[in-house]
Image: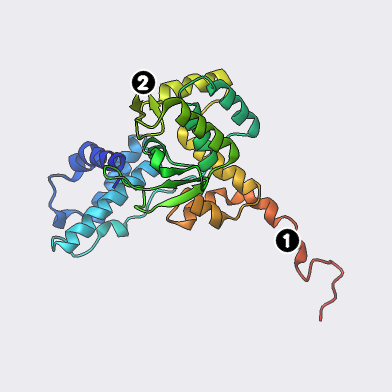
Amino acid sequence: KAAKTVYNERWMIRSNLAPFFGKTKISRISPAAIERYKSKRHRDDMSPRTINMELQLLSVMFRLAMRLGYAKRNLVRDVERMREVKKPPRYLSTGEVSRLLTAAKETYLHPLIVTALHTGMRKAELFNLTWSDIDFDANTITIQSKEDWQTKNRQYRTVEMTDALRRVLYEERERNGVENPYVFTYGGERLRWTVKKTLRTICRKARVGNVTLHTLRHTFASHLAMQGVPLLHIQQLLGHHDYNTTLIYAHLSSESHKGQVHRLPFDDEDTEPS
């Protein structure tokens, strides 16, 4: 798993699951006990999504216990998950994109923001992008695992560069050279996770709120959907393992379905029964 995923899961275990279940034998954990855990986390004002993630992690533990012979069945499967309210993803309008790029123009984050908007890459994928991943002749970027880092699904994918992106990355290479193998650097060092402060400053200047690097990924996919790009193609570009994940953009591609209901054979109210 990705290092951040491992960190988050360890945090969930040490902070919540272990204090509640840690001293209880697996054979004595019941669906009722898991329901009590759900209620406690709900009283802690945790979001349904967070609670469901913790239950999923507990379910993984039970499956491991079953393989090792410590449990006969996965009791978490008997517990209903919390109902999550689905919200459309936050994405930037073309006007917001323009203001954001203008505000970022003279900052070290400008090439990274442009790349995120034009490829939909995840944050970890951006930070682990190397010059060897970019083929200026073929006009492509290959998102692939490294010795010290794995892509989310341990698979690679190739994204074509737009003209604007190619120009920005080419200028970045000419300006900084390739002594540092990583594309996005600051002060000679590769970028890590600490770009939030600079991004917030850029967003304030651009008068754009509620933006993270993941928002730029949503922006990439949302505008493709609105331009009529099939969701299956968007899934491949984003590197989604599950097509259902890509369906959050389905409502934006409604124009491709507009007028289709009028093809029904009984659309005419004067249609006579056969």
Residue contact at pointers 2 and 1, CB within 8 angstroms: no
Q: Which mark is residue 187?
A: 2
Q: Secondary structure at mark 2?
A: loop
Residue picked out by circle 1: 260
Q: Amino acid at mark 2?
A: Gly
Nearest the eye: 202 or 130: 130
Of label 2 and label 1, which has the lower sequence position? 2
User: Residue at (28%, 56%) from the top-left corner?
Assistant: 76
How many badges with numbers are in the image? 2
Residue 254: percent from left, percent from top: 66, 52
Judge left or right: residue 105 versus residue 194: right
Judge left or right: residue 228 versus residue 51: right
User: Residue at (60%, 55%) from the top-left corner?
Assistant: 230
User: Residue at (15%, 54%) from the top-left corner?
Assistant: 26
Decide if residue 91 is in sight here: no
Nearest the eye: 12 or 77: 12
Q: Secondary structure at mark 1?
A: helix
User: Residue at (34%, 44%) from the top-left corner?
Assistant: 51
Q: Nearer the viewer, mark 2 or mark 1?
A: 2
Nearest the eye: 172 or 257: 172
